[in-house]
Amino acid sequence: MLGQCDRQIEPETVAKNSKRFTTMDSADTIVRCDDCSMRSHGILKDVPDEVFEHISCCMTGYKFPAKHLIFLEGNPCDQLGSIRKGQVKLSKQGENGKTQIIGSVGPGFIIGWEAFRGKPYQSTAETLTEVELCMTTREKIVDQMREFPDLALGLVGFLCYWIAELEQKMLHLGTFSTRQRLAAYLLSAYESEECFGDKGSVQLILSRQEIADTLGMAKETLIRLLAKFAEKGVVTLDGSCIVIDDPQKLSQILSASI
């Protein structure tokens, strides 16, 4: 909670189906809601302190290890939550049985929004890193939204942002060349929570194959483009780590000026 209150993460199961949710790894982990990512850049960033404290009381914190399924596409959606820490991969199963990666999301992002519609989960969520997630039920959050309109406005703002992101991705896939798509992806990672270390070092959490799937290209095409970017001094490759040497050149590639 806010201020002087600390809330201890409870080591309990949050859903009947153990395939969707797991127990907490550590019973002595403390969640402080006042320094949560939702407070700094999530849907609760603009609500008054007293409202934030009240809303945080209906949230329960959980910790998931890396490479763990949080929920599966098609399963009943009875909970939603906000990512407090870490990265989560969202994917969907295509009609041909191939998994299509929607993308990776991080702190402040809401997953399980389908709970508002009473529909099954529309995607599968898997942790890429250790993840801290604050969960609540549809009933609790709807009650809070009725009482605190600022929360409802924050959620509407998040949904507008997510729709805009999906529209932008559709634009990239439909009109951008493969090199432009890669440039856009690297710039996005450079400016997001995936950026670690000094001098623009970006730790790519997704594998090369997963990045290629996300960008709608073959893995071989991705590897070839990365090598070309490295030759031109745009990036430096070091295993899974990519150093953005010249973000301006990436922007120029994105605008097709070079």
Image (cartoon, rainbow, N blue to C red):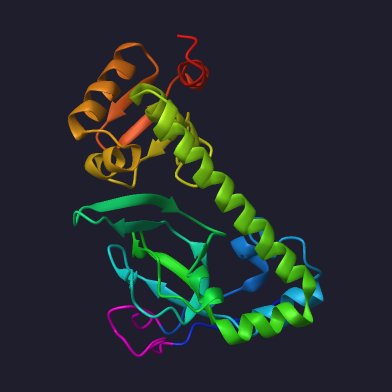
> Could you tell me residue 34's position as x and y percent?
68, 69
- Classify the position of the C terminus by image quarter: top left
Q: In this orientation, which residue lies closer to the viewer: 34 or 140?
A: 140
Report the side of 216 relative to 30 (left or right): left
Secondary structure of the magenta portion, mostly?
loop
- Classify the position of the N terminus by image quarter: bottom right
The residue drawn where x is 26% and y is 29% is 222
- Any part of residue 4 in sight: no
The residue drawn where x is 32% and y is 50% is 101
Q: How many marks?
A: 0
The residue drawn where x is 53% and y is 37% is 191
Q: In this orientation, which residue lies closer to the viewer: 177 or 81?
A: 177
> Could you tell me residue 94's position as x and y percent?
26, 55
> Could you tell me residue 188's position as x and y percent?
49, 37
Look at the image and say whether residue 18 sits in the magenta stretch: yes
Residue 164 figure quarter: top right
Q: Answer above or below: position of 216 versus 115.
A: above
Look at the image and say whether residue 235 sits in the magenta stretch: no
Q: Answer above or below: position of 206 versus 219.
A: below
| Residue range corresponding to the magenta coloring | 11-26
The residue drawn where x is 52% and y is 69% is 113
Report the side of 190 relative to 157 (left or right): left
Q: In this orientation, which residue lies closer to the viewer: 81 or 122?
A: 122
- Any part of residue 26 in sight: yes
Q: In this orientation, which residue lies closer to the viewer: 44 or 151?
A: 151
Looking at this view, name the residue that lies furthest to the front. 95
Report the side of 8 relative to 48 (left or right): left
